[in-house]
Image (spheres, rainbow, N blue to C red):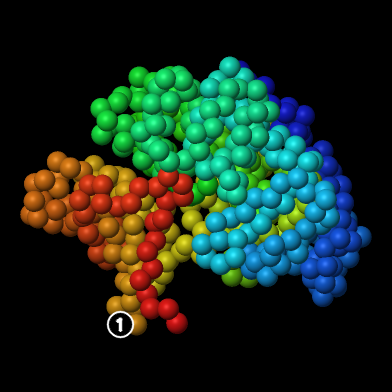
């Protein structure tokens, strides 16, 4: 029998009953932002829609979308629905591609976040007697403190190492007998690699589970982490714009991510037409906040590509499921007329035993067309055999990718440890195309 969920009332609520709860919260939220956020009042008025027009959940499709640039244009607190006297914390994205995205929270918002994260960690198998090492960055980034909120709610022992200082992380993990590791998936692999360098066998540690998020990762990478560290690798999904991790989560079945539907209304839309698509069809994921007070989002376009499905899971939860995100519309590359996501290439590379799971995609202009080069690290025993062996492996990878993707991609095998390691989100794309 599966274990009882953290919050059985909502996680196992019949879909019809949950829908009624969502509709009530949706009506409250659209009225809240219409009255308190000039940006939304203007957008709703321009679209000819009023809060009282929401009679069903399907009516959300009548409302305009919110996009990342809306948050940047209203930086820092133009979309905040409460006075700053009611804000108790502010998080923000890194702002590497412009002004950072800010996320203010009321005390109630933090409580909701803690609840969502507690569900996430509980579903991963973490319990009050666990020792949880949080190796996400602490600070403005939502990762570290988001997982801290959830682990605190569970009541387990928290080791807040933050990211970086990998040898020290491993020493603490061993000495403190850490049982749960919380970090980005790419940093988990960085830790595994460092442990191998230091002659440490992670499989002899007390670790039993890891909860990873903050960047797209494939099923192949999940298997790589599980094999190299000897743990069960679980997922946390979320965005700064929606309050951080805890929007959706893995359960023991590992067959899609459960969305915390009492807090988030999910849609999938066609990225071209922006029209909602039926359950089961692929498209761009869109979320509307249902209980957030400081900065609710109405129809926020995540850019993440996935599918939704409604089914009762073997774990007992009835929450809507989203498939593992395999790409983002803004990460998609068009090479020789073919749409390619980094995650597709990652999955194929991880099928090649001669290489490490460390790679970058370099995009350049070749005439009028975009050209893609994949730089991937060779395993030491391969690299040390010299140029002839490198060329043989490069040809093997190139043929494998062409056979699966239908296009020719340049493969460049590089020396082990050459590609920069990630202590947070991994940088997978280097765009060397001339700026317009």
Q: Is residue 166 above or below residue 214?
A: above
| Neighbourhood count class around disc 1 (C-alpha, 10 Å): few under 14, some 14–19, many 20 upward | few
Q: Relative to residue 144, is residue 39 depicted above or below?
A: below
Question: For residue 101, which quarter of the picture?
Answer: bottom right
Q: Is residue 79 left or right of residue 390?
A: right
Considering the numbered disc 1 on the image, is that residue within a helix, a strand or a loop? loop
Q: Which residue is mark 1?
A: 367
| Depth order, front residue of 231/199 | 199
Residue 309, x across and y down, in percent = 62, 45
Q: Nearer the viewer, residue 180 or 106?
A: 106
Residue 356: give x, y in percent of width and height: 27, 44
Across and down, in percent, residue 277 comes to 65, 59
**In the displayed structure, would residue 134 be above or below residue 155?**
below
| Numbered circles on residues, count | 1
| Nearer to the camera, 255 or 365 | 365
Q: Quadrant of the N terminus?
A: top right
- The residue that appears at 31% across and 31% down in the rendered structure is 195
- Residue sitting at x 68%, y 70%: 73
């Amino acid at each position: 029998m599966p274990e009882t969920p953290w919050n059985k009332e909502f996680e196992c609520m019949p879909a019809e009953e949950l829908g009624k709860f969502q509709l009530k919260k949706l009506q409250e939220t659209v009225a809240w932002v219409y009255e308190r956020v000039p940006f939304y009042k203007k957008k709703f008025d321009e679209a000819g829609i009023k809060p009282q027009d929401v009679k069903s959940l399907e009516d959300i499709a009548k409302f305009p979308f919110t996009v990342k640039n809306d948050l940047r244009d209203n930086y820092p607190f133009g979309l905040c629905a409460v006075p700053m006297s009611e804000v108790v914390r502010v998080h923000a994205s890194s702002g590497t591609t412009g002004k950072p995205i800010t996320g203010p929270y009321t005390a109630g918002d933090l409580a909701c976040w803690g609840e969502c994260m507690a569900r996430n960690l509980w579903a991963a198998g973490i319990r009050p007697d666990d020792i949880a090492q949080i190796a996400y960055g602490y600070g403005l980034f939502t990762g570290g403190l988001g997982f801290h909120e959830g682990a605190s709610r569970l009541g387990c022992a928290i080791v807040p190492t933050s990211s970086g200082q990998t040898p020290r992380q491993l020493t603490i993990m061993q000495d403190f007998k850490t049982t749960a590791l919380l970090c980005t998936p790419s940093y988990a692999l960085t830790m595994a690699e460092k442990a191998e360098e230091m002659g440490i066998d992670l499989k002899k540690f007390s670790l039993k589970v890891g909860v990873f998020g903050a960047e797209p990762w494939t099923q192949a990478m999940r298997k790589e982490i599980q094999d190299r560290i000897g743990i069960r690798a679980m997922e946390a999904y979320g965005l700064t714009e929606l309050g951080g991790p805890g929007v959706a989560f893995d359960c023991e079945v590992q067959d899609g991510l459960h969305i915390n539907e009492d807090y988030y209304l999910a849609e999938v839309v066609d990225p071209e037409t922006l029209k909602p698509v039926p359950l089961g069809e692929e498209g761009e994921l869109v979320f509307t906040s249902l209980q957030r007070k400081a900065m609710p989002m109405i129809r926020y376009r995540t850019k993440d590509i996935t599918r939704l499905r409604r089914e009762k899971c073997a774990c007992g939860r009835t929450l809507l499921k989203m498939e593992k995100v395999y790409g983002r519309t803004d990460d998609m590359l068009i090479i020789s007329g073919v749409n390619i996501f980094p995650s597709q290439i990652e999955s194929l590379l991880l099928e090649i035993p001669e290489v490490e799971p460390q790679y970058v995609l370099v995009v350049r202009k070749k005439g009028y067309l975009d050209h893609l080069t994949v730089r991937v690290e060779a395993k030491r025993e391969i690299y040390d055999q010299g140029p002839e062996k490198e060329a043989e492996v490069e040809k093997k990878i190139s043929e494998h990718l062409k056979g699966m993707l239908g296009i020719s991609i340049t493969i460049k095998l590089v020396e082990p440890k050459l590609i920069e390691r990630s202590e947070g989100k991994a940088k997978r794309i280097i765009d060397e195309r001339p700026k317009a």
